[in-house]
Amino acid sequence: MKQRNMVRWLFLLPNLMGIGVFALFPMAEVLVGAFRSAIGGSWVGVRNFRTVLSNRAFRLAAFNTGRFMLVCIPLLLCLSLLLALGLKRVRGGRQLRSACLLPMAVPAASVVLAWKLLFHENGLLNGVLEGLGAGGVNWMGTSASFWVLVISYLWKNLGYTVVLWTAALGTVSPSVYEAAQMDGADSFRSFWYITMPNLKTSAYSIAVLSLLNSFKVFREAWLVAGDYPQEQMYLVQHLYNNWFRELDYDKIAAASVLVSCVVLVLIALLRRAWDKEDQG
């Protein structure tokens, strides 16, 4: 038995070494760097955190990032679930689900080009609005830029989330629905009392993945609007990029620790809410 356990650990050792070198060690370095100065590496305690929290750019970026998540994640979860339920009922739904994954395969440069064609002041969308008699909108220079960012996130992540919901829906046995129909349950009751309770565990995983993916919308926004986009489009990732260029590593480390703590707290609260729901 001991020899078998030793063999198992030997197989795991390369992966554990990779995790330690490329994940755990950088995380520890960032955590320590949050309490040290960028120049000289002297210990400064919580000074970096006070500097970050008093920084107007950080407060703006944190507010915009939080608002972005509060708007996008519920929209993404609801729209993708409705779309997954619809595709499950139509003929050829499997092919349509595969087509939904195409946005994830589109290169970022192509997405940026599409953005510019659609949302430029002289772009296609403003051309349609002017043709309908409505005035054009400065999409990237006003508060409308926030909704452009929302649309981009939904467009890119909707298909992937639909596939996740479809996999979760496939775990519910059709015989349960047949028994409910024999008892006189309509489609809404079947959805509310059968589908939703069976999706709770999957819904938690999908919600966490959507939360993490909401931090990956920076690339397209940066390529379209640059380092300093319209104020309501300025996210935490923009701030990291600007501080990195200015070599403010101590601020980046402190801000990263703060954001990581907030994300961990959100995930823990979500887990606790799910556990309470299951116990109830």
Image (cartoon, rainbow, N blue to C red):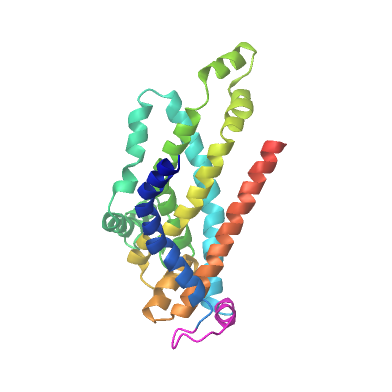
**Residue 129 on image: x %, y %:** 39, 53
How many numbered badges does the structure rendering display? 0
Q: Choose between 26 and 262: the one closer to the eye.
A: 26
- Where 22 sits versus 158, above or below? below
- Where 26 sits versus 150, above or below? below
**Residue 242 on image: x %, y %:** 40, 76
x 54%, y 65%: residue = 259
Residue 143 seen from this side:
yes
Q: Choose between 220 and 34: the one closer to the eye.
A: 34
x 56%, y 14%: residue = 178
Extreme-right residue of the structure: 280
Residues in magenta? Answer: 37-53
- Where 208 sits versus 36, above or below? above
**Residue 87 on image: x %, y %:** 43, 29
Extreme-top residue of the structure: 182
- Where 199 sits versus 269, above or below? above
In the image, taking residue 70 as reference, residue 277 lies left or right, namely right
x 56%, y 72%: residue = 59
x 71%, y 37%: residue = 279
**Residue 98 on image: x %, y %:** 33, 35
In the image, is residue 94 part of the stretch drawn in magenta?
no
* Quadrant of the frame with the C terminus: top right
Residue 235 seen from this side:
no
* Quadrant of the frame with the N terminus: top left
In the image, taking residue 47 as reference, residue 91 lies left or right, namely left
